[in-house]
Structure formats: C-alpha cells, structure tokens
Amino acid sequence: MVSGRLIGVDVGKVRVGIAQAYLDTILALPVKTLKVQADGSELEELASFIREETTTAVFVGLPRLLNGKEGEAARMARSYARRLARKISPIPVRLIDERLSSVTAHEKLRAAGVSTREHKKMVDQVAAQQILEQALEMSNIGTDLTGELVIID
C-alpha cells in the first residue's frame, strides 16, 4: 500500500496553487498559493514544503487544449514540473491532464458563496485540489499512481 502525502500543483504565469492529501484520508485540501517570482524563488519554497513531511508523489496539472494538444501553458507546466522534479528527487513528479480545472475551481468557489473578488486569492489552491482529486480518482492507490512521470536529465 502506498503511504504518505500527495501534493497537487496548479502552475500559472502569476501564481502557483498547492493542495495536499494524506493517503489515510484520501481527501484533498487546498493549502496555499505562491506568487511566481522572476527569479523562481517560489520553486524553492514549494520544494521545501514538499520535503517537510513524507511525500509520496507530486501531481502537476498539465493544461492541454480542449482538442488534447499542448499549447504554451502546457509547455510552461512541463518546464516547471521538470525544475521541481530536479529539486525534490527522488520524490516522483507526475503530470495530470487538467483541462478545465480552473473553471471547475471557480464554480466550486461560487457554490461555496465566495465573492468573485475573493476568487483570485483562492482559485489556484482549489484548482490544485481539483488536480489532486482527479489523480486520486484515476489511481488505484494500492498499486499504481497515475499520470505521466516527469523524467529529469
């Protein structure tokens, strides 16, 4: 049985959302949002957070286009995932198709009564939660983790 903590990451140009789940509860929760820094220093903060506890795997959202192809946002997410994987090796980083996770996150926030003005502060965390919940649903936790494994060179 796989044990430990799973991390979900939603990468954007401005912010990075983080969610986590403990495998004994299999409940993903939004954790925090990091502001993307020009020097990439938020990546070290994320890596430190991941290393704080026993983390089994990290799932980074891969925002494919609706037709399944990859655009600029997907290339950016792949690059970010590779840089993260180098910092936290040997913890595996996996890419999860996350089409519409931000749309779903906004819908969840509206349904929870969060004002549109407050969405910016939380939407990336909730999108990361969506990514992680999707990974949990797609995985057979007892044996395999889902997603495309990020290979570091």
Image: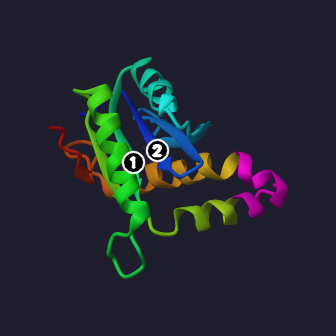
Residue type at mark 1 is: Val
Residue pictured at 60% horizontal, 68% vertical: 103
Q: Secondary structure at mark 2?
A: strand
Q: Which residues are magenta?
A: 109-121
- Check disc 2: other Cα within 10 Å, few if <14, some if 14-19, many if 20+: many
Furthest residue toward bottom: 67
Which secondary structure is most common in the magenta stretch?
helix
Q: Residue 78: percent from the left, percent from the top? A: 32, 52
Mark 1–mark 2 CB contact (< 8 Å): yes
Residue 70: quarter of image: bottom left
Q: Residue 125: percent from the left, percent from the top? A: 60, 45
Residue pictured at 72% horizontal, 46% vertical: 121
Residue 72: quarter of image: bottom left
Q: Is residue 28 magenta?
A: no
Report the Cα–Cα distance between label 1 and label 2. Answer: 5 Å
Residue 107: quarter of image: bottom right
Tell me: residue 111, above or below residue 144.
Answer: below
Q: Which residue is mark 2?
A: 9
Residue 105 visible in the displayed image: yes
* Residue 52 left/right relative to 147: right
Q: Which residue is mark 1?
A: 60
Q: Which quadrant of the rendered structure holds the C terminus? A: top left
Residue type at mark 2 is: Val
Residue pictured at 48% horizontal, 49% vertical: 11
Q: Is residue 113 magenta?
A: yes
Of 106 and 120, nearer the camera is 120
* Residue 14 left/right relative to 76: right
